[in-house]
Image (tube, rainbow, N blue to C red):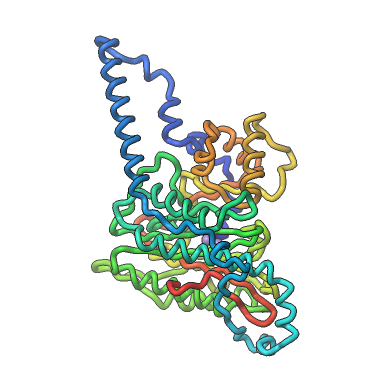
Amino acid sequence: MSDSAEHKEAAPAEKKADDWLPDSVTKAGAPGKKNNKKGNPKDKAKAKKKAKAAAAAAAVAAEEEAKANAPKGPDTPVSSLFPDGHFPVGQRLEYEQPLNLWRRESEEQRQREKVQEDQYESLREAAEAHRIVRQWAKSWIKPGMKMIDIADTIETSLRKTIDAEGIKRSIAFPTGLSLNNCAAHYTPNAGDTRVLQETDVLKVDIGLQVNGWIIDSAFTMAFDPIYDPLLQTVREATNAGVKAAGIDVRLCEVGEAIEEVMTSGELTIGKHTHPIVPIRNLMGHSLGLYTIHAGKSVPCIKGSGDQTKMEEGDLFAIETFGSTGHGLVHDDVEVSHFMKAPNLPSTGIRGGPKAKELYNFINKNYSTLGFARRWLDQAGISRYAIALKNLTDCGAVNPYPPMVDADGSFTAQFEHTLALKPSGKEVFSRGEDY
Ligand code: MN
Ligand code: MN
């Protein structure tokens, strides 16, 4: 997930009540249509019923077939691959800033890092599961697949490799599968029939956590090589941000390093060459225990003016977004990502027993991590749309709508999670792929 300037100001109340209801609910719930028949009502009703049953059976068969054909992914818990509890160490990067050079050789600093080893091992375990699942996912994600099957297949494997157990170890937020001008926070809801296209630019944003320590890392896939310059530019921009990060470095300086690389790229589609611009209202962020946005935001642009310093021990998700559009995203309508607010609203929970029951479920199963409507469906919770709307209306749960740039534009994202350790940086999510 990413930090956005907009979602903080977004008022969920603006949205129409219908926006919250899945298609299935709005259609089935439309009253008065059923008794509106002419002619031989009995015969027609019978035929209709028959056709409906046949369609339902076909849908079930198709679903079964899709499930049977779904790629069988990595299913060995990473914890059992490394039974001694020592997981592959992330990429080590030296601090480059003159003010940090002394840290490289400091034995004292290295000793201090040992205090944090448990935290780092949790992050390394989550990062290893992330690498295993994403490398496999890249081998089978292809145009023609339904987005919802892609999401479910990835998440099934994530739960196995992380050895999911309550909030002790789990997926940290819904698997982002944002397409084209949508930069972030799209994952399919139930009933989503969208199919991946040959011309699509797909951002895969995966979060995993162990003991509350979160790996938030994303990459972009495209099936037409014309998009390669966009992907390459954004990957390099993210790496520039990773390189610039350091203890006592100001957040605005990281943004400057990112923008410089981002704006050096361009993308030619047909006769048109588009400059690549950073998306200025999507940002990287510090990470905390069970906390995806821990307070500091890392801009993708220079001139943000944010003088806040990165500090020793900070964890950051460094993520950059490049776009052929305006470089500014706004909320889209159908929301799939939600997260409990850190504190109960002062008014308490509104909406009656159903809302309270849903809140308790969210609290127990996801705590302050993100969750998808799909996950509520999978847990067997039904007719939760009103209760969920009540929770977002009263501020107990925050919605994270999809963030989209101009129609027809293309956006790409790369993201890594790193720690600013006393003697150097560790980029946990680094792999051979990105
Ligand atoms: Mn992310
Ligand atoms: Mn993020």
The residue at 30%/70% (across/down) is 268
Compare residues 94 and 262 and report the one nearer the observer. 94
The residue at 59%/66% (across/down) is 83
Q: Is residue 305 visible?
A: no
Q: Is residue 322 visible?
A: yes
Q: In this view, does 53 lie to the left or right of 116?
A: left
User: Where 304 sits versus 328, above or below?
Assistant: below
Residue 279 lies, in percent from the top left, at 48, 65
Quadrant where the image shows the N terminus: bottom right
**Figure label count:** 0
Q: In this view, does 206 lie to the left or right of 271?
A: right
User: Where 9 sits versus 395, above or below?
Assistant: below
Compare residues 109 and 86 and report the one nearer the observer. 86
Residue 232 lies, in percent from the top left, at 39, 73
Quadrant where the image shows the C terminus: bottom left
Q: In this view, does 37 lie to the left or right of 301?
A: left
Residue 111 lies, in percent from the top left, at 74, 81
Residue 127 lies, in percent from the top left, at 54, 66
Asked where in the image residue 67 lies, by quadrant, the reply is top left
Q: Is residue 69 left or right of residue 210?
A: left
The residue at 58%/70% (across/down) is 87
